Image (cartoon, rainbow, N blue to C red):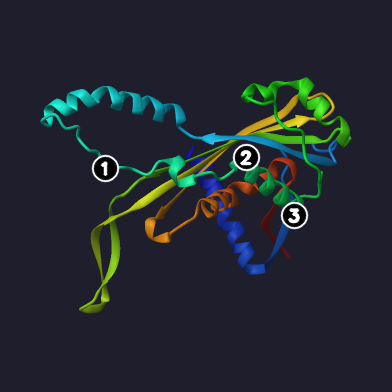
């Protein structure tokens, strides 16, 4: 083991010395293999999406538990129910924003701008009313949906979002106003919110209606209440960060590498 490590170290030293003595650096661009075999697909159809709030079921269970505990709380407080500080829910923040449509429009624009695929420019068929995630397994529905679009690759899925209060005490570095060259660590209470998006993506073969690939992507950002963000700006910020992961599924990303060549 010691001899092997010594050989590796010696090799690195020799390579470094040779590189310093007579070598030059070249930049190489190479493409990484996509997660889907894309040779058979020239067109991509961005289908409709399902949308909802993350943790809806948990929120409902918590509300029912709180309702059951109200009588006991009322007795302890002299007959008056204890008043909890109201918190902004995810639904209150996001309001009536149509995340299903926003997701589809965003993907349309980004795939058109950042891939060589022909993004089908027409409205996809509506998802079955009242259907759940089982629609993504319905091969007949998707094969029929793609029949009028020359059997493209279909991208569909589900978007879920959430927001929660993560306020608390944080440590910050500030300049000492009495000594400009000195920094102090202070603890302050900051009002902050955490925003989450979860995308369940399904790539479906238009010929057979079968899934060829699926992936779940999630992103979370934290912002101060001072940022005064709108729901739409939060959505785009989260999508911007994970979009490269989506395009890499269908379009080979280019990786830049540096190599040393000896003269």
Q: Position of residue 250 (x, y in %)?
A: 74, 41
Between residue 119 and residue 121, name the one nearer to us: 121
Element type at mark 3: helix
Quickly name the residue at label 1.
85
202 on left or right of 88: right
Quickly name the residue at label 3.
113
Element type at mark 2: helix
Element type at mark 1: loop
Q: Give the residue displayed 18% in from the left and 23% down from the top.
A: 72
Q: Position of residue 196 (x, y in %)?
A: 48, 43
Q: In the displayed orientation, state which residue is furthest to the front.
A: 79
Marks 2 & 3, CB-CB < 8 Å contact: no
33 on left or right of 190: right
Mark nearer the viewer, 3 or 1: 1
Quickly name the residue at label 2.
100
Mark nearer the viewer, 2 or 3: 2
State which tag comes first along the sequence, 1 or 2: 1
Question: Dot 2, crowdedness within 10 Å: few (<14), some or many (≥20)?
Answer: some
Q: Give the residue displayed 49% in from the left and 55% down from the top.
A: 230
Dividing the image into 4 quarters, which one contains the C terminus? bottom right
Looking at the image, can residue 36 be seen? no
Q: Position of residue 202 (x, y in %)?
A: 68, 32
Marks 1 & 2, CB-CB < 8 Å contact: no
Q: In the displayed orientation, state which residue is furthest to the left.
A: 78
Real-space Cα separation, disc 2 to disc 3, in angstroms: 20 Å
């Amino acid at each position: 083991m010691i001899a092997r490590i010594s050989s590796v170290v010696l090799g690195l030293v020799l390579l470094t010395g040779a590189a310093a003595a007579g070598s030059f650096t070249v930049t190489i661009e190479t493409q990484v293999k996509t997660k889907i075999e894309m040779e058979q697909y020239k067109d991509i159809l961005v289908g409709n999406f399902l949308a909802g709030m993350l943790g809806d079921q948990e929120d409902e269970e918590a509300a029912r538990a709180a309702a059951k505990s109200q009588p006991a709380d009322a007795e302890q407080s002299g007959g008056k129910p204890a008043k909890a500080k109201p918190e902004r829910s995810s639904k209150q923040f996001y309001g009536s924003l149509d995340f299903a449509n926003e997701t589809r429009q965003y993907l349309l624009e980004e795939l058109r701008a950042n891939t060589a695929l022909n993004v089908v420019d027409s409205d996809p068929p509506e998802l079955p009313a009242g259907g759940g995630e089982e629609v993504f397994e319905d091969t007949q529905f998707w094969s029929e949906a793609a029949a009028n679009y020359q059997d493209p690759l279909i991208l569909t899925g589900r978007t879920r979002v959430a927001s929660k209060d993560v306020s608390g005490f944080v440590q910050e570095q500030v300049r000492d106003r009495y000594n400009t060259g000195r920094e102090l660590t202070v603890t302050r209470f900051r009002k902050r919110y955490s925003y989450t998006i979860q995308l369940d993506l399904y790539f479906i073969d238009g010929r057979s209606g079968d899934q060829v690939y699926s992936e779940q992507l999630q992103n979370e950002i934290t912002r101060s209440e001072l940022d005064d963000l709108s729901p739409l700006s939060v959505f785009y910020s989260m999508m911007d960060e994970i979009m490269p992961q989506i395009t890499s599924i269908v379009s080979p990303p280019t990786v830049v590498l540096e190599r040393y060549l000896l003269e």
